[in-house]
C-alpha cells in the first residue's frame, strides 16, 4: 500500500534533491572559476578541497528550509504552482542567509559569481525535477499506478460530490474504495453503515478516509473522527457548509474555541495593502503626466463632437461601501448622460466620437484621478451605481464581498471579457476569485493583459456568446 512505502519514497525524494543541490554547486564552481575565469583560485576552488564539503553543507541547509515550509509533507493535492513558489522562496531565503554569513565573517575570497550561478542552477534543477515528476506521476496515475484508496464516510450530496471530483481529476491518483453511511439507491460500492466503520478501517486496504456527512448527520462527526484516529487512518473532513465556504478560510483560537473566519483576503495585510496603494499612486501619477497629450486630444474631441461638458461624473459605491464620484470622458449625448441607467450597448445613446473612445476604453482614463485620490485602484472589481448595488445584493450571491477592496479601473472580470452589458453573476464570481487570490503578480498580469487587448471593448461578442450558451442549455 502507498502508506507503507511513503516514508521511504519521501527519503529518496529528499536524497535526490540534495544531490541536485550539490550538482548545482559543483557546476557553478566549475563554470565560473574554470571556464569563465580561467582557473581563478578562491574558497570555492577545487584545489582547496572546499567544493564538496561546502556543497553538502549547503544542500543540508536547503533541505532543512524546504522541510520547515512543509515541502516534503505527503499531499498529492498540492498544486505544482505551490511547489514552484515554495522552492523559489526557500532557495532564495537560504542563499540570502548564506551571503549574509559571508559578509559577517568577511569571506571576501569567496566568489559571488559562483553564488549567482549556483542559485540559477539550483532553481532550474529543483523546479525542473518537480515539473517532470508531476507530469510523470499524472501519467502513471491515469494508468492505474501509485493509487491511494479512499474510504468516503457519508452517502449524501457532499460525499457523492467528492467522489465525482476525484474521479474527474484522475491525475491525483485517488480511487474510491467505497461509501459508508445510510444506504442510498444507486450508490456503489456501498460497504455498510456507520456502525461497521471500525471494522472497515481496521483493514490494510484503506489509505485515507474522507468524512463528508450531511448537515442532519453532523452530530455524528466527533464519533466518526474518533473512529479514524483509533485506527490510525489519515482522514479529512468536508464541512457540511462546504458549498458556502471559501477556498482559504482563516482559523483563530480564543481559549478552547476554534473560530473559522469564512472569508480572509490577502489585502487585509497592512503591508500588502500599503504596497498596492504605493503602486497605485506612482503609476497613476506617472500615467497622468505621460498621457497628458492624449488626454488633451480626447478632451478636445469630446468638446467638438457634441455640446456639453467634457467630463461625465457619476456616483458609484466603492471601498467599504462608501460612495464616491467616478470620472469619465463623456461618451453619451447630453440627454442620455443625464439618465442614471445600466449601460445598454444596443441603444443609440453615444456620440460617434463617444463610440470610438468607448471602443478603446479611452473614456476611462480620467479615473486615474480617482486612483490618485484613493477612491479607486488600478486593478480591482468595477464599481456600480448605488441603485444597482441595492438590487444586486439581494439577487446575486456574494455580491457585497467585492466592496472589501478598492474598485479598479480594470479587473480580472474585465480582461476575461465580462464588462458592460454582460453577466453580472459571472463578473462577481471572477471578482471574488481575484479578491481571495490577490498577489502583486496577479495585478501585473491583469495590467499587461489590459494593455495587450483588454482595452478593446468586446462586450457585444461576449454578450452574444452568453446568449448562445443559454440557448444551448435550455
Image (tube, rainbow, N blue to C red):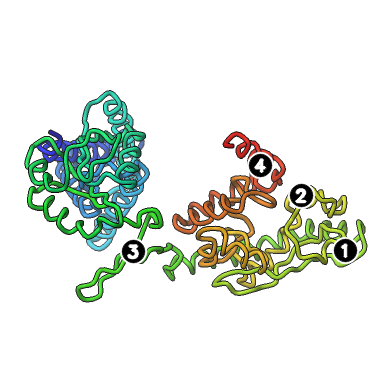
User: In the rendered structure, which disc, 2 or 1, sits on the residue that comes first in sequence?
Assistant: 1
User: In the rendered structure, which disc, 3 or 1, sits on the residue that comes first in sequence?
Assistant: 3
Which numbered circle lies on residue 334? Answer: 1
Q: Residue at x 68, y 64 (%)?
A: 368
All told, the count of numbered labels is 4
Nearest the viewer among 458 and 384 is: 384
Query: What secondary structure is found at the residue carrying circle 4?
Result: helix
Q: Are marks 3 and 1 in contact (CB under 8 Å)?
A: no
User: In the rendered structure, which disc, 3 or 2, sits on the residue that comes first in sequence?
Assistant: 3
Residue located beneath label 2 in the image: 345
Q: Is residue 211 above or below residue 129?
A: below
Which numbered circle lies on residue 462? Answer: 4
Nearest the viewer among 295 and 449 is: 449
Classify residue 87 as left or right of residue 72: right
Tell me the quadrant of the picture where the N terminus can be found: top left
Q: Give coordinates of residue 291: x percent, y percent.
A: 73, 58
Residue located beneath label 3 in the image: 250
User: In the rendered structure, which disc, 2 or 4, sits on the residue that comes first in sequence?
Assistant: 2
Q: Give coordinates of residue 260: x percent, y percent.
A: 32, 65
Q: Are marks 1 and 4 in contact (CB under 8 Å)?
A: no
Amino acid at each position: 500500500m502507498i502508506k507503507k512505502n511513503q516514508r521511504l519514497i519521501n527519503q529518496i525524494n529528499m536524497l535526490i534533491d540534495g544531490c541536485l543541490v550539490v550538482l548545482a554547486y559543483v557546476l557553478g564552481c566549475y563554470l565560473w572559476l574554470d571556464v569563465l575565469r580561467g582557473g581563478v583560485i578562491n574558497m570555492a576552488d577545487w584545489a582547496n578541497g572546499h567544493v564538496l564539503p561546502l556543497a553538502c553543507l549547503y544542500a543540508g541547509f536547503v533541505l532543512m528550509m524546504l522541510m520547515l515550509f512543509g515541502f516534503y509533507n505527503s499531499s498529492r493535492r498540492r498544486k505544482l504552482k505551490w511547489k514552484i513558489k515554495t522552492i523559489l522562496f526557500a532557495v532564495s531565503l537560504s542563499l540570502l542567509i548564506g551571503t549574509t554569513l559571508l559578509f559577517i565573517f568577511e569571506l571576501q575570497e569567496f566568489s559571488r559569481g559562483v553564488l549567482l550561478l549556483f542559485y540559477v542552477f539550483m532553481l532550474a534543477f529543483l523546479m525542473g525535477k518537480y515539473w517532470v515528476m508531476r507530469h510523470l506521476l499524472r501519467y502513471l496515475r491515469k494508468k492505474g499506478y501509485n493509487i491511494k484508496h479512499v474510504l468516503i464516510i457519508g452517502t449524501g450530496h457532499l460525499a457523492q460530490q467528492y467522489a465525482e471530483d476525484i474521479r474527474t481529476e484522475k491525475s491525483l491518483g485517488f480511487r474510491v474504495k467505497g461509501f459508508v453511511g445510510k444506504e442510498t439507491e444507486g450508490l456503489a460500492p456501498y460497504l455498510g453503515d456507520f456502525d461497521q466503520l471500525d471494522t472497515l478501517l481496521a483493514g490494510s486496504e484503506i489509505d485515507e478516509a474522507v468524512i463528508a456527512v450531511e448537515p442532519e448527520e453532523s452530530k455524528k462527526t466527533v464519533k466518526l473522527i474518533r473512529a479514524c484516529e483509533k485506527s490510525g487512518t489519515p482522514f479529512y473532513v468536508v464541512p457540511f457548509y462546504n458549498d458556502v465556504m471559501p477556498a482559504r478560510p482563516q482559523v483563530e483560537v480564543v481559549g478552547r474555541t476554534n473560530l473559522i473566519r469564512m472569508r480572509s483576503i490577502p489585502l487585509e495585510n497592512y503591508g500588502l495593502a500599503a504596497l498596492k496603494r504605493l503602486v497605485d499612486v506612482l503609476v497613476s501619477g506617472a500615467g497622468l503626466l505621460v498621457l497628458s497629450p492624449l488626454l488633451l486630444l480626447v478632451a478636445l474631441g469630446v468638446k467638438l463632437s457634441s455640446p456639453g461638458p467634457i467630463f461625465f461624473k457619476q456616483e458609484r459605491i466603492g471601498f467599504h461601501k462608501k460612495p464616491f464620484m467616478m470620472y469619465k470622458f463623456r461618451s453619451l449625448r447630453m440627454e442620455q448622460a443625464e439618465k442614471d441607467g445600466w449601460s445598454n450597448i444596443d441603444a443609440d445613446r453615444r456620440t460617434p466620437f463617444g463610440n470610438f473612445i468607448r471602443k478603446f476604453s479611452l473614456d476611462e482614463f480620467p479615473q486615474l484621478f480617482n486612483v490618485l485620490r484613493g477612491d479607486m485602484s488600478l486593478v480591482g472589481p468595477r464599481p456600480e451605481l448605488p441603485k444597482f448595488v441595492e438590487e444586486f445584493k439581494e439577487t446575486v450571491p456574494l455580491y457585497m464581498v467585492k466592496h472589501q477592496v478598492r474598485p479598479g479601473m480594470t479587473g480580472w472580470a474585465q480582461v476575461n471579457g465580462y464588462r458592460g452589458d454582460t453577466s453580472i453573476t459571472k463578473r462577481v464570481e471572477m471578482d471574488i476569485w481575484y479578491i481571495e487570490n490577490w498577489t502583486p503578480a496577479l495585478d501585473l498580469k491583469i495590467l499587461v493583459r489590459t494593455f495587450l487587448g483588454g482595452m478593446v471593448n468586446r462586450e457585444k461578442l461576449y454578450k452574444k456568446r452568453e446568449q448562445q450558451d443559454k440557448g444551448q442549455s435550455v
